[in-house]
Amino acid sequence: MASRSLRLLLLGYLGLLSYRKVSGISIETDNKNVKAEEFKEAILSCKHKFSKGMSLRIEWKKIQSQGVSFVYYNGEFTGDLQGRAEMLNTGIRIRNVTRKDSGTYRCEISAKSEEGQRLGEATITLTVLVAPTTPVCEVPSSAMTGTVVEMSCRETEGSPPSEYQWYKNGVALLEKTGTGSARAANITYTMNKKSGTLLFNTVTKNDTGEYFCEASNGIGLSQKCSAKRMQVDDLNISGIIAAVVFVALVMALCGLGVFYAQKKGYFAKGSSSQKTNYQSTSEKDFKHTKSFVI
């Protein structure tokens, strides 16, 4: 029993010693979620409350799915930040940021004191905002009334993701909300600003026009594709019937022609002529063979 109590006291004393050797410190940042436009600068702050005379060790790391990599180590920047980053006390200023710089960064500071080694860290998320590029628009050149028509608009470079606005003949199309001006306009389409689709469940001749789409995400200038014309026409029933009748007449005439040729014996004459030539040739060959034997 006494040995067990002595063992517990010893463990407690060792724990106290380890606590005195390594203890946590408070590290602060001005902004845990930094957002910066592409090709501009971003500042990742990291602040501590150590006295100026203390010896500090500062490291910056980037946390990625494949692991943790050094950004600032042993007084130097490494990797992609070489040549375009600088220290601001214990923080970082990154110039000309790109979308590859987006991610989670960790500031780690350690210092030696009379109480032992002291450690602290802060995590900052950097999001690089990217303006949209010219979207790709798909607009059919023609359509028949009463059919389903879907137009699409998409661009994949913008961050955050872009929203899309469709235009017809230079005028912005309204969303189908079911209230107000959108309801009064008797809208026959559905526009999805998130996905960029414009859907006509039953297209009409009034939907004929030039269409284009505009992509925007609040960063930089919005981008639009070139206008494309869609022509909507009525289904020509009489024309289809006339074409069917014409094809049927042509097929009937071809059949009558073949029947007439067979009745006149054109096909039979050709075969009998070939048979006669074959027989005459065989007789000549036979006579020649007979004379040779004699």
Image: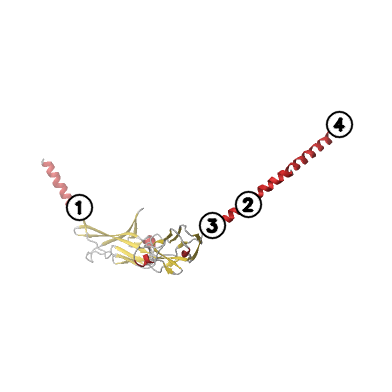
Disc 3 from disc 1: Cα separation: 92 Å
Q: Are marks 3 and 2 in contact (CB under 8 Å)?
A: no
- Closer mark to the observer between disc 3 and disc 1: 3
- Mark 3 neighbour class, 10 Å CA radius: few under 14, some 14 to 19, many 20 or more: few
Q: Tell me what residue is drawn at x 15 percent, y 47 percent.
A: 10
Sequence-first tag of 4 and 1: 1
| 270 in relation to 192, above or below | above
Kind of residue indicated by mark 1: Ser
Kind of residue indicated by mark 2: Leu
User: Depth check: 121 or 51 in front?
Assistant: 121
The residue tagged 2 is 249
Disc 3 from disc 2: Cα separation: 18 Å
Quadrant (top left, top right, bottom left, bottom right) of the C terminus: top right
The residue tagged 1 is 18
The residue tagged 3 is 237
Sequence-first tag of 2 and 1: 1
| 278 in relation to 22, above or below | above
Look at the numbered disc 3 and give the secondary structure of its residue: helix
Kind of residue indicated by mark 4: Lys
Q: Give x and y (percent) for residue 94.
A: 35, 66
Q: Tell me what residue is drawn at x 77 percent, y 38 percent.
A: 275
**Render colour scheme:** secondary structure
Look at the numbered disc 1 and give the secondary structure of its residue: helix
Look at the numbered disc 2 and give the secondary structure of its residue: helix
Q: Give x and y (percent) for residue 190.
A: 40, 61
Disc 4 from disc 2: Cα separation: 59 Å
- Mark 4 neighbour class, 10 Å CA radius: few under 14, some 14 to 19, many 20 or more: few
